[in-house]
Image (cartoon, rainbow, N blue to C red):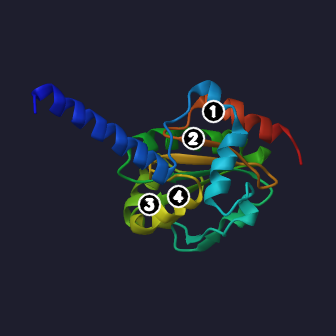
Amino acid sequence: MGRGAIVGLGLAAAFVGLALANLLHGDRPAPAPAERSAAASASDRVARSAGRTDNAWEMAPIELPDLDGKVRRLSDWKGKVILLNFWASWCGPCQFEIKDFVRYQREYGEQGLQIVGVGLDEARKLRNVRRSLGMNYPSLVIPESRGAALMRKWGNHSGIVPYTVVIARDGHLKFIQRGQFSDEAFRLHVLPLLSARS
């Protein structure tokens, strides 16, 4: 078999492997900015993963300790606009966006914004980040080994962090951001929810 045939077979095998992985895991590349505005498709993805609902209050509840050891439930913040952010202490982009989240919470908390972190790491390491970056919002703690299963329930099949889900006051899932959350995403997908009273 010639070198060209071997290269061709290798490329074909890689293509089949990627297609099979996409079929099995249902992940797609991150959408382009124009596509991200289609919040319905984001909530549909979570709904498929979360038992066919696009409402956080109809999903299996999140109940985890916070960084101070107090058990908290996501429903503790029912009625607020929630940015549910999965992060880790070792994740550079997570630490960059935490600075923005601190600013968002400070500026919009009185309007009903509640950022809730879910740290996939040891509590000690997460507390160090909280102290270093002055986190002014709660972060729940889940061991990294259990975090992947929780993220899958929220539509994150690839396990990428940071990963943020925007939840409206009524619990409906409005937007998903894989990767670092931006000021543009906040302006387009969070600010309108803060000005709309349900």
Q: Residue furthest toward the left?
A: 2
> How many marks are shown on the rendered structure?
4
Horizontal arrangement in the rendering, residue 2 relative to residue 80 (left or right): left
The residue where tag 4 is placed is 151
- Residues at marks 4 and 1, CA–CA distance in whole angstroms: 19 Å
Tags 4 and 3 in contact by the CB under 8 Å rule?
yes
- The residue at the point 61 percent across, 58 percent down is 49
Q: Is residue 191 above or below residue 43?
A: above
58 or 66: which is nearer to us? 58
Horizontal arrangement in the rendering, residue 15 relative to residue 162 (left or right): left
Circle nearer the N terminus (4, 3): 3
132 or 193: which is nearer to us? 193
- Residues at marks 2 and 1, CA–CA distance in whole angstroms: 8 Å
Q: Amino acid at mark 2?
A: Gln
The residue where tag 1 is placed is 36
The residue where tag 3 is placed is 120
- The residue at the point 78 percent across, 35 percent down is 192
Circle nearer the N terminus (3, 1): 1
Q: Secondary structure at mark 2?
A: strand
Q: Amino acid at mark 1?
A: Arg
- The x and y percentages for residue 46 are 64, 53
Classed neighbour count for the residue bearing mark 2: other residues with Cα under 10 Å, few (<14), some (14–19), many (≥20): many
- The x and y percentages for residue 71 are 59, 74
Q: Image quadrant of residue 12?
A: top left
Q: Residue furthest toward the right?
A: 198
- The x and y percentages for residue 123 are 42, 66
Q: Is residue 167 above or below residue 125?
A: above
Q: Amino acid at mark 3?
A: Leu
Give the mark toward the camera: 3 or 1. Answer: 1
Circle nearer the N terminus (4, 1): 1
Tags 3 and 2 in contact by the CB under 8 Å rule?
no
The residue where tag 2 is placed is 177
